[in-house]
């Protein structure tokens, strides 16, 4: 795939870039390594001031940055503005809390026969971030903000269709005060990733992307013995039980499926509804989906913009056609429009069977699969009957049932009476083929830290676990 900005609303190529040469990449890695040696010696407070400056820039530049993202990948302008604001909030969150997250953690010295014992969190070096186009700013920021606060440097290999957003990010951190090399965008194709991750100066990698990309990174990282955090696909269930508030569930289901034009790893994709309320929910949900306005993502009246690529649209069209050919019923949508741009209407399909692709594959567009179940046990079985385990939603007002769903749903994130969302305050990540490791919160920051055990014997005069430069 060439490195280019192509407007998904028109199909027009607006700007393209030559990939960086191996020599340019090597120079960037060397600079990231040198910058790490300096950054780790700065104080958390200093890094917090730079990250706060990045947040201020994001707020000040919200509208132009949002326009850039909409032009590169088609999300609605309103959604893009919200994404910029969320990134600024994440920067402020880590600027405010990193000191506490990175503070030495005292342990029971007496139990380990020490004068002093504690855990110290220290940065590990340049980290490679391989990031997707669907939240072009946020996916990067949720890695970059904690990584930079911890004293690591970042090397970004962004998706090839969002090069201008990728370059904006490098420029943003630089203008905020981080020295050159602290955060670098590498304009390269995915064929360069193996070589970059094999470089001994690159200490770890984080990837948000497809299962295939995750396996490939994990293979290289395994060979090189490097830490990885992987956030891969999802086929999130959205279970509706008889006690649920159906109007609210149908409203949130519509947002959960069509947010970001249906292209979110944590979008609800499989709607698993108890037979007692199936017809009532299906009618409300299909009506809401059909009422969404599809069109120009810059138009404030638009709910759903184009898909990011022609290939992506062809894929969901093929998944829907496969289901229909095998007997599925379309409640709304289901027809690929003609005309310029990669639009696809919000679609609901039901009467699904295991042999249909939609049953087991991730559907990365505004297409909802509706499943009928007749008991709690069957709901959980269908919800967990996927290779993925990123998010899961359960709608019920019965407190005991809520508790059972929390325990039984096999996912990294369970949301009861709400849709899966990421917050800087909460860990985010998956189980099964959705990946491993956690982003966000203190856990996300510590994924790329050396969790150093410190044991100090009685042979010397010692101070308690205390402040340190990193
Ligand atoms: O695509 C997955 C990430 C979505 C989010 O963090 O809100």
Image: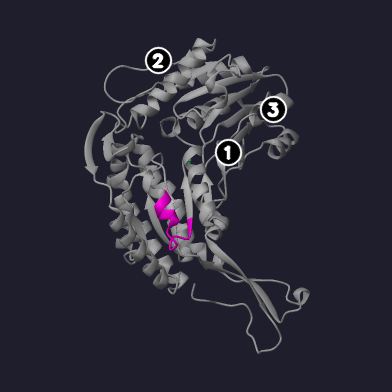
In the picture shown, does residue 469 fall above or below 388? Answer: below
The answer to whether residue 440 is visible is: no
- The numbered disc on residue 433 is 1
**Extent of the magenta region:** 194-204
Secondary element at tag 2? loop
Residue that appears at 55% across and 77% down: 467
Front residue of 247/431: it is: 431
Q: Which quadrant would the N terminus be assigned to in this image?
A: top left
Q: Nearer the viewer, mark 2 or mark 1?
A: 1
The residue wearing badge 3 is: 381
| Residue 446 inside the magenta-drawn segment | no
Colour approach in the figure? one colour
Task: State how far apart marks 3 and 2 are (Cα).
Answer: 31 Å
Mark 3 or mark 1: which comes first in sequence?
3
Residue that appears at 73% across and 22% down: 375
Task: State how far apart marks 3 and 1 are (Cα).
Answer: 17 Å
Q: Measuring from the top left, give residue 204's x and y in whole percent.
A: 49, 57
Label 3 close to label 1 by CB (< 8 Å): no
- The numbered disc on residue 335 is 2
Secondary element at tag 3? helix
Q: Measuring from the top left, give residue 469's x and y in whole percent.
A: 49, 76
Secondary element at tag 1? helix
- The numbered disc on residue 420 is none
């Amino acid at each position: 795939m060439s490195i280019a900005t192509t407007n998904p609303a028109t199909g027009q190529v607006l700007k393209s870039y030559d990939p960086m040469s191996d020599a340019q990449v090597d120079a960037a890695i060397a600079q990231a390594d040198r910058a790490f040696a300096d950054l780790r010696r700065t104080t958390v407070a200093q890094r917090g001031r730079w990250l706060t400056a990045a947040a201020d820039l994001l707020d000040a530049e919200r509208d132009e940055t949002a326009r850039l993202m909409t032009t590169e990948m088609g999300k609605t302008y309103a959604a893009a503005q919200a994404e910029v604001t969320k990134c600024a909030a994440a920067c402020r969150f880590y600027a405010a809390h990193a000191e506490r997250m990175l503070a030495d953690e005292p342990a029971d010295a007496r139990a380990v026969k020490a004068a002093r014992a504690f855990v110290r969190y220290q940065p590990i070096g340049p980290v490679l971030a391989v990031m997707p186009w669907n939240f072009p700013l946020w996916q990067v920021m949720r890695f970059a903000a904690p990584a930079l606060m911890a004293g690591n440097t970042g090397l970004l290999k962004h998706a090839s269709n969002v090069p201008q957003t990728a370059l904006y990010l490098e420029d943003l951190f630089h203008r905020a005060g981080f020295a050159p090399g602290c955060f670098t965008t590498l304009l390269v194709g995915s064929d360069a990733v193996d070589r970059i991750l094999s470089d001994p100066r690159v200490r770890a990698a984080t990837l948000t992307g497809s299962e295939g990309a995750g396996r490939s990174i994990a293979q290289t990282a395994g060979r090189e013995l490097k830490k990885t955090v992987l956030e891969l696909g999802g086929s999130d269930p959205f279970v509706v039980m008889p006690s649920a508030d159906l109007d609210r569930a149908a409203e949130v289901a519509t947002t959960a499926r069509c947010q970001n034009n249906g292209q979110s790893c944590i979008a609800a994709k499989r709607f698993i509804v108890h037979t007692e309320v199936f017809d009532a929910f299906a009618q409300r949900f299909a009506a809401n989906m059909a009422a969404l306005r599809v069109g120009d993502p810059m138009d404030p009246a638009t709910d759903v913009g184009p898909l990011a690529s022609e290939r992506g649209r062809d894929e969901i069209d093929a998944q829907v056609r496969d289901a229909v050919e095998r007997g599925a019923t379309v409640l709304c949508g289901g027809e690929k429009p003609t005309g310029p741009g990669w639009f696809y209407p919000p679609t609901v399909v039901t009467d699904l069977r295991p042999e249909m692709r939609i049953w087991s594959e991730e559907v990365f567009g505004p297409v909802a699969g509706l499943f009928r179940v007749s008991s709690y046990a069957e709901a959980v079985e269908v919800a967990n009957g996927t290779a993925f385990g990123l998010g899961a939603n359960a709608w019920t007002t019965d407190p005991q049932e809520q508790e059972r769903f929390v325990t039984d749903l096999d996912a990294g994130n369970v949301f009861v009476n709400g849709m899966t969302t990421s917050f800087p305050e909460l860990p985010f990540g998956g189980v099964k083929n959705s990946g491993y490791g956690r982003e966000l919160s203190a856990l996300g920051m510590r994924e790329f830290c050396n969790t150093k055990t410190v044991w100090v014997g009685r042979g010397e005069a010692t101070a308690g676990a205390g402040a340190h430069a990193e």
